[in-house]
Image (spheres, helix red, strand yellow):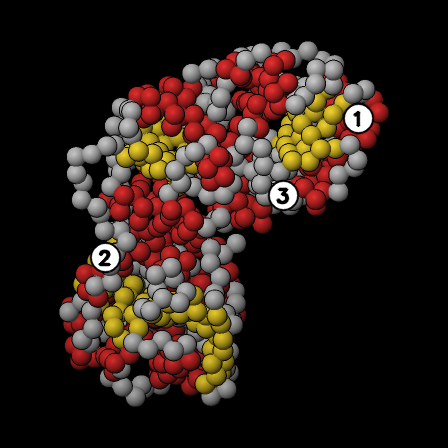
Amino acid sequence: MRARLPSQEGIVERNGVGLHYEIYGDAPDTMVFVPPWSIVHSRVYKAQIPYFSERFRCITYDPRGNGKSGRPEETAAYSLDNHVADLLAVMDAAKAGRAILVGLSFGGHLSCIVAAHHPERVRAAIIAGTSAAIGPAHAYMLPDHFHARRDTFEGWDKYNRDYWLDNYPAFADHFVRHIFSEPHSTKHIEDGLAWASETSGPVLARTVEARTVPPSFEVGEEMYRRIACPMLVLHGDQDKIQQHARGALVAELARAEFVTIPGGGHNPLGRFPAKCNALIVDFLDRRLQIPSPMRSRRRMPRQKRVLYLSSPIGLGHGRRDIAVARELRQLHPGIAIDWLTQDPVTRLLTSAGEPVHPASARLVSESRHIEAEAGEHDLNAFQAIRRMDEILIANFMVFQEAVEAGAYDLVVADEAWEVDHFWHEHPELKKAQLAWLTDFVGFVPMPAGGAREALLTTDYNAEMLGHVEHRPEVRGRAIFVGRPQDIVPLSFGRDLPEMRDWIPRHYDFSGYILGEHPQSLGPRDELRRRLGYRNDELVCIATVGGSGVGTPLLRRILQSWPMAARRVAGLRMVVVTGPRIDPASLGAPPGVELRAFVPDLDRHLAACDLALVQGGLTTCMELTAAATPFLYFPLQNHFEQNVHVAHRLDQYGAGRRMDYATATPDAIAQAMVDALSSPVGSRPVETDGARRAAAMLSELL
């Protein structure tokens, strides 16, 4: 799912070639994102557009030869003159006026040309990994190499016209991997290959052959000296496409600010977006007086301030985080806690009287993304998180603004993956103490993903382990919500440590954290009376959490209801759909009660006689603590539910695991009958998890 869609799009035609452009936002200041070489298209700026389009009118367009733009067959159509004219034509069609240009690689070259020869069109230029007609070049990028006749192709010999015509996919793979030469760049490479597949070897050959067409304007050193607008040049010192020295020379001649990205490859905007976005914001603040939303508030002696991030995937994180926050207030009376999170957690917080940070409204919905990724009771959670990268960087930038402007003392991140990742990647962005909470550590490949998924989970785990080990100062505290025995007996992947060895060295254990332990709810008979349940009836509750992923399971359970009702006298069925499923869409049979949002669901689960749930940890542990019998149906291909949660429930001896693929309505009905007639033998759940976690957080204050 894209983090933001364009508010307007169109096509401008030049000499028979259509150029597709998109406009995001409607702010008075305009940014034009100039496409690089035609091996990719405008989506290369996906880590910038969602964030900057909140404060700027952002214009992107696909280059001729890729995306939704035309692919002319004449070599001369790809001349430098035509590319420059394309940029100006898009600016005219989109009414860009005098704009800020952002250009990656060849887009940086085009930005410099327009800044020098059309200064009235450019307020400022921001270029990254820029190409240029000056400065040193890698030998394999020279024209003689491209036109050489070769019988075999090794390494960069693939930068050759004949090879592109015969084996373009292999060249694209080779080139994209050298764009993203940094370790742990698998998702960036996948994106680049997808964009590269939208063009062809013959098209790219024409773009290179067209470089022999002399431009009608100066592109040498004198051109850069003519640039008068403010300019920021970003360049990775490990760029394998355009030499770092080339970017330095461009910056020197143009009197531009030059920032080296240590360890960076050719596309720092995509590979290190948090750092680059922050640099751009700071540059525009200083040079164009466009106020930075990241300008830090002056710290004064005052009450302690906490920014609490609670994962929005379901409601379980919210319930436990509210419990921790209440305990923290007991330790620090007067402390101010703001919550930065999304629906449906914001509904839970509002019902609990907790203050929701206004920036929460700007966060891109992670729940909608998860729902879009799901099939019929099937969610590859690892791949869904990988494909959420565009959303995560957009939300991280909102967080970074909030934490800098709010002068917080402590950030509590309950599985806020983007905060932990980007602060480890760029520790200089960290502006407060960080406490990290999670109830699992380590991605696990699912069998259906095969060797490829095993490779990817190992790579992601290796990056996380490296972050923690090389930069231990980033996390002020890392809290595992559970006990050591809750860690699965697996390794993080090939040649990586065992989870049970590594995690205790880097985490403290709070025990499990319940929103409210059933022991505090009073006698069960009295609780049932308060909730409207009679003692002479058997109450069954079916619930699937706070996302819309559980719709197929609820429908399957509703099909089983008439069979179960015939076998169990006095059975009452209550279905809690959650805030993201319309109860009317389920077509429930007569006799079934439907409820949407139940903020005190944990009390109902403690009072009922049987529960049917998905495989989410929070709900299952609430049922375990209440000694309520339950059937749980882990989502297929969901590594957390099938591995981490299932292992933990086994440690407590709780719940009966059901396989959705084989659980027919009749099988579910019979499992309900069996569960209602079987004794519950689960082990007790600890009662002081929230207090212990709060004490750990308190030390950071």
In the image, is 42 to the left or to the right of 676?
left
Q: Secondary structure at mark 3?
A: loop
**Label 1, label 3: how many angstroms apart (C-alpha)?**
24 Å
Q: Is residue 165 left or right of residue 578?
A: left
Q: Residues within 10 Å of mark 1 (few under 14, many from 20)?
A: many
Look at the numbered discs 1 and 3 and tell me whether their residues touch, using CB distance below 8 Å.
Answer: no
**Frontmost residue, 522 versus 377:** 522
- Which residue is depicted at the point 52% across and 65% down? 197
| Label of residue 282 in the image | 2
Horizontal side of residue 111 vs 321, given as left or right: left
Label for residue 564? 1
Q: Give the residue pinned by disc 3.
A: 581
Query: Looking at the image, is mark 1 or mark 2 earlier in the sequence?
Result: 2
Is residue 222 in view from this perspective?
yes
Residue 165 locus on image (x, y percent) = 51, 72
Q: Amino acid at mark 3?
A: Ile
Tell me the residue at 68%/33% (across/down). Answer: 575
Q: Is residue 479 above or below residue 287?
A: above
Tell me if residue 295 comes above or below residue 634 in the rendering.
below
Amino acid type shown at disc 1: Ala
In the rendered image, residue 371, in percent from the top left (x then y), is placed at 58, 46
Question: Which label sits in the foreground, 1 or 2?
Answer: 1
Give the mark, 1 or 3, whose residue is nearer the N terminus: 1
